[in-house]
Amino acid sequence: MPYTTEEIKISNKIFYYILKHGELKEEAGELYKAYSENENITELVKELGEASECYVKKYGGVVYLIPKEDNDFLGYSKGELKKILCKSSANDKDYYLSQFVILTLLVEFYSSQGITSNSREYMKVGEFLNIITDRLNDGVNRTANNIGSEESGIAFENILERFEALKSSDKKSTSKTTKEGFINTILDFLDSQGLIYYIKSDDMIKTTKKLDSFMDWNLLNKNNYNRVLKALGEEINE
């Protein structure tokens, strides 16, 4: 299908706008209207995203640019995430622990199969720490009993070892060598990405509309939700 010069110009403007602002909302006026109402422009913007190794997706009335898994230019490489989330001497076990923490956070907030996948309004940091410990211990026990050990793909014992190697602190710590500081670093990162609200004065975690929409429309369709549960070694009830 041929595109007009004007459609190409508008598509370039829209793509640059999303790159600059991270999202395209109705408040953007004519650019948002053009993306939503003109199929040619929608297709052109998506093609620009594809050329940049990104997905252009519209969730909850907002258009987002989502880097593909291997896109370490607009996204983060494994090495960059390890540097941001883990201590300076971190190895792969520390990195996998950080990813397990994030995955656990998502499952705790999004376990509903109703109109919305969000199942709770907030979570206290202390509760979250206990949940991580419980899930790791449960995973180790299941593996020891050969229940789901081949299917989950998670080395629970290795990850638990790294988590237990972190010091515990009764005070609020920001050091990545403590459990509290390690979790604090991850929550700070997720907050900076606009995915959660980390309210430190109340030790409280809340999700943002951006993450809610993304989980509702993409991650937690039935197949993907079951895949996440399977990764954590949970039983799946069809």
Image (tube, rainbow, N blue to C red):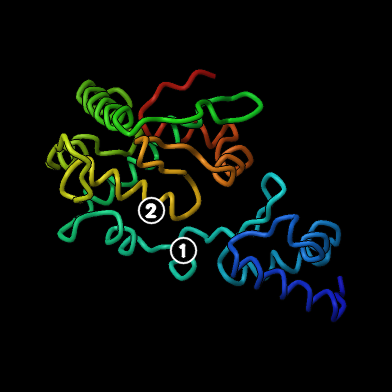
Disc 1 on helix, strand or loop? Answer: loop
**Snapshot quadrant of residue 128:** top left
Q: How many labels were placed on the picture?
A: 2
Image quadrant in which the N terminus is located = bottom right
Disc 2 on helix, strand or loop? Answer: helix
- Residue 166 left/right relative to 203: left
Q: Which residue is mark 1?
A: 75
- Residue 229 at x, y percent in the picture: 43, 30
Identified by mark 2, the residue type is: Phe
The residue at 15%/37% (across/down) is: 169
The residue at 85%/78% (across/down) is: 6
- Residue 132 at x, y percent in the picture: 29, 32
> Outermost residue, bottom direction?
5
Image quadrant in which the C terminus is located = top right
Q: Which residue is mark 2?
A: 189
Residue 123, compared with residue 199, is above or below; it is above
Classify 10 Å Cα crowding around label 1: few (below 14), some (14-19), many (20 and above).
some
- Residue 14 at x, y percent in the picture: 71, 69
Distance between the alpha carbons at the discs numbered 2 and 1: 13 Å
Which mark is nearer the camera, 2 or 1?
2
The residue at 57%/63% (across/down) is: 54
- Residue 203 at x, y percent in the picture: 34, 36
Identified by mark 1, the residue type is: Gly
- Residue 133 left/right relative to 199: left
- Residue 96 left/right relative to 235: left
> Outermost residue, top direction?
237
Residue 228, compared with residue 93, is above or below; it is above
| Pick the front one: 219 or 117 | 117
The residue at 52%/33% (across/down) is: 225
The answer to which of marks 2 and 1 sits earlier in the sequence is 1
- Residue 199 left/right relative to 170: right
